[in-house]
């Protein structure tokens, strides 16, 4: 294709992505009764208090994704140097594409198309390292919280409970060891004849040392603390009287269960609501408030960033430039 044809084709793709994203978001929002329930819960609360609390939760959304942008910037330092603002653009653009793709696959495309063409596949591998780090924390904290949940609410024989604790310990140790030795995966792939010819793409796995992986994990931990705080603030605000430890336990379990279920970001609110409703039913009967809180976090953390990301979709670089190529 000529340069002009590439520009026209690129613009059409970007416009289609934006239109598709808005169409999906619109239809999901108008059918979401949980958000209406959340609005009804706020009727008797002073407006100043509402603005203050929602404002803090909204602010944490930006902190969350800015931390993700900083993590993304560090992950690809071995590949390509980008500015922090460029990292923010790619993260928000990825959120827009993730909203209508299974298991957030579009998020990969939204980010790597901000890199030069020859480094995009390597960028996918680097992003996977960051996602594994986030998954490690979700699984470790979730498994520990689930063991406490079983101890408190499920009557088991002490031998079976002890066996579960051993499994939880082994589960957590496995994920931690695997992440800090992710270069082992590079060695495994090199030992396979079929995958050896693609080593230029996954060879970056061998460059991540333990000190660097620890820093990446700290970004993941900071993000985990931020979005956990969002849930904690809303639950303690709208459902007073709950024990703080119980709320933290349920939040960790909620993240853990969600991470194991394949879904679309757009329909993830249903999974979040059902999961939250079930587990929180052990500590409160205010089911409507639980589901409404979950839906509001979905709106703030997923839908609003996806809308903001539509602006950055038009900065996607599908074909690259002569310089980047």
Image (cartoon, helix red, strand yellow):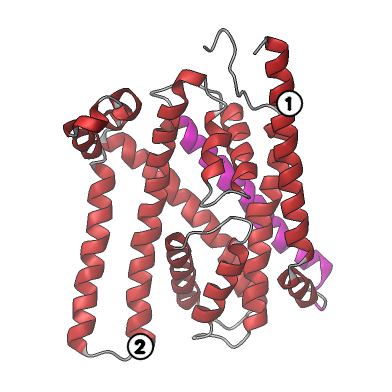
Q: CA distance from mark 2 to mark 1?
A: 56 Å
List the residue tagged with mark 2: 154
Q: How many marks?
A: 2
List the residue tagged with mark 1: 11
Q: What's the magenta bit mostly, secondary-structure-wise?
A: helix
Is residue 219 shown above or below 273? above
What residue is at 54 percent from the left and 57 percent from the top? 227
Q: Residue furthest front?
A: 1
**In screen coordinates, is 273 left or right of 179?**
right
**Residue 49 colored magenta?**
yes
Q: Nearer the viewer, residue 293 or 9?
A: 9
**Residue 85, position as x, y percentages in the image:** 61, 29
The secondary element bearing badge 2 is classed as: loop
The secondary element bearing badge 1 is classed as: helix
Give the residues in magenta.
Answer: 44-73
**In screen coordinates, is 215 left or right of 192?**
right
**Residue 21, position as x, y percentages in the image:** 71, 46
Q: Which quadrant would residue 291 be assigned to in this image?
A: bottom right
Is residue 296 shown above or below 240? above
Is residue 307 shown above or below 41? above
- The 10 Å Cα crowd at callout 1, few under 14, some 14 to 19, many 20 or more, is some
């Amino acid at each position: 294709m000529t340069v002009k044809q590439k520009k026209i084709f690129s613009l059409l793709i970007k416009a289609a992505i934006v239109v598709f994203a808005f169409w999906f978001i619109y239809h999901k929002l108008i059918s979401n009764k949980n958000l209406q329930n959340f609005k009804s819960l706020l009727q008797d609360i002073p407006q100043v208090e509402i603005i203050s609390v929602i404002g803090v939760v909204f602010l944490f959304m930006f902190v969350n994704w800015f931390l993700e942008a900083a993590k993304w910037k560090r992950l690809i330092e071995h590949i390509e140097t980008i500015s922090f603002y460029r990292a923010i653009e790619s993260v928000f653009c990825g959120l827009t594409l993730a909203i209508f793709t299974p298991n957030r696959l579009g998020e990969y495309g939204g980010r790597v198309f901000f890199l030069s063409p020859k480094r995009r596949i390597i960028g996918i591998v680097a992003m996977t390292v960051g996602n594994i780090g986030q998954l490690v924390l979700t699984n470790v904290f979730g498994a520990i919280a689930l063991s406490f949940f079983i101890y408190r609410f499920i009557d088991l024989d002490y031998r079976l409970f002890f066996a579960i604790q051993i499994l939880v310990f082994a589960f957590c140790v496995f994920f931690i060891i695997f992440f800090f030795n992710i270069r082992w995966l590079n060695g495994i792939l090199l030992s396979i004849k079929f995958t050896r010819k693609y080593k230029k793409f996954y060879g970056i796995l061998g460059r991540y040392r333990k000190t660097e992986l620890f820093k990446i994990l700290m970004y993941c931990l900071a993000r985990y603390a931020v979005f956990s705080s969002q849930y904690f603030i809303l639950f303690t605000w709208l459902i007073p009287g709950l024990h703080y430890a119980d709320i933290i336990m349920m939040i960790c379990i909620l993240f853990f269960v969600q991470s194991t279920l394949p879904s679309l970001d757009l329909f993830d609110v249903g999974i979040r609501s059902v999961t939250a409703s079930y587990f929180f039913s052990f500590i409160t009967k205010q089911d409507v408030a639980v589901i409404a809180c979950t839906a509001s976090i979905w709106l703030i953390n997923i839908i609003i960033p996806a809308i903001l990301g539509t602006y950055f979709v038009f900065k996607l670089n599908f074909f690259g430039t002569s310089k980047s190529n």
